[in-house]
Image (cartoon, grey):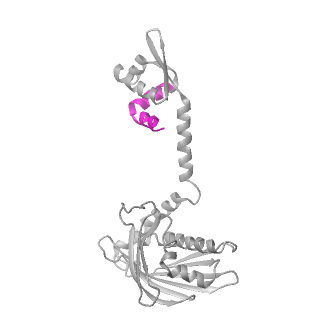
Amino acid sequence: MDELLTALADPARWRLVSLLAERPRPVGVLARLAEARQPQTTKHLQTLERAGVVTSQRTGQRRVYALRSAPLRDLAAALCRLADIADQAGGPQVTYDRYGHSLDAERLAAEASGWADGRSFSFHRSLAGRPELIWRHLTEPALLSRWWTPDDLRVSELVFEARPGGRIVLEYRDVDDTDGSDLVAGRGEGVVEDALPGERLAYRLSPQLPDGGAAFTSHVDFDLRPTATGTDLDVRYRITDSTVDSADFIAGIEIGFAQSLAHLATAVQSENPEEPQESEGMEVQP
């Protein structure tokens, strides 16, 4: 496949393939129709033949080339499979496009400091686990690292001291950056404000800009309530101290935090396989 793609990538060779799709033709005629010199045309045809997309046979003094359609059909099928993967309903490409639309809107809105202050997001999840188990996933670094990022990221550094005044550090990288060779995707630092085990957790966390300054401050409250089947978790995410440069971060809150909570539900579910899956809801408030 690589050799075929390389062969077809050259515009001159693509022109010859197009001419041969119409009918088999000799080298001289191909050179004239392609407006090229015959020696160059011959070299291009030999490259295409080595790639398997054309074949040739000598007829008297002429060498006639013909197109082999099978490799092109195989390539077309491979490209269609890639397109289908990219276009799958609810897949990463859809999320990427949603973030792009949100990014455009937030950048237009970010005209001065404080532009997003007071904006809040509310999330609800019904989780298949008792409040004590949910609390552990909210506060223990080893469990937090399993869910506290969106789909395409992984936790690379995490400090979470689950007590009032406790320190928080969250750093994350691309999920495929397993050796730390790429740039850090994001980093935030904050402090725990309230921690009532099994009932309530509150903290503030400030994502950092590339220069080390705070993009904004998020105030996040988790309320846990036991139910007959597990725990109802309500999350309120409120923004203060927003800077003009915070637009890119704020654009991803709705999508990214919802994905993180979906990971939390999966992590909890894995410890309670007999329980039903969680239900979810999200409300954004201006």
Number of marks in the image?
0
Residue closer to the observer: 10 or 56 = 56
Q: Is residue 216 above or below residue 72?
A: below
Q: Position of residue 276 (x, y in %)?
A: 69, 73
Determine the main secondary structure of the stretch shown in magenta: helix
Residue closer to the observer: 102 or 13 = 13
Query: Is 18 included in the stretch rendered in magenta?
Result: yes
Q: Position of residue 155 (x, y in %)?
A: 45, 70
Q: Is residue 215 above or below residue 50?
A: below
Residue at the limit of the structure toward the top, as seen here: 60
| Quarter holding residue 14 | top left
Q: Residue at x 43, y 73 (%)?
A: 250
Observer able to see residue 219: yes
Residue closer to the observer: 118 or 152 = 152
Q: Is residue 185 above or below residue 31?
A: below
Observer able to see residue 111: no
| Quarter holding residue 12 | top left
Is 109 left, or right, of 86 in this rendering? left
Q: Position of residue 206 (x, y in %)?
A: 39, 79
Q: Residue at x 34, y 20 (%)?
A: 39
Residue at the limit of the structure toward the left, as seen here: 211
Is 38 left, or right, of 94 in this rendering? left
* Magenta-tinted stretch: 1-20
Q: Position of residue 202 (x, y in %)?
A: 48, 86
Query: Is 27 included in the stretch rendered in magenta?
Result: no
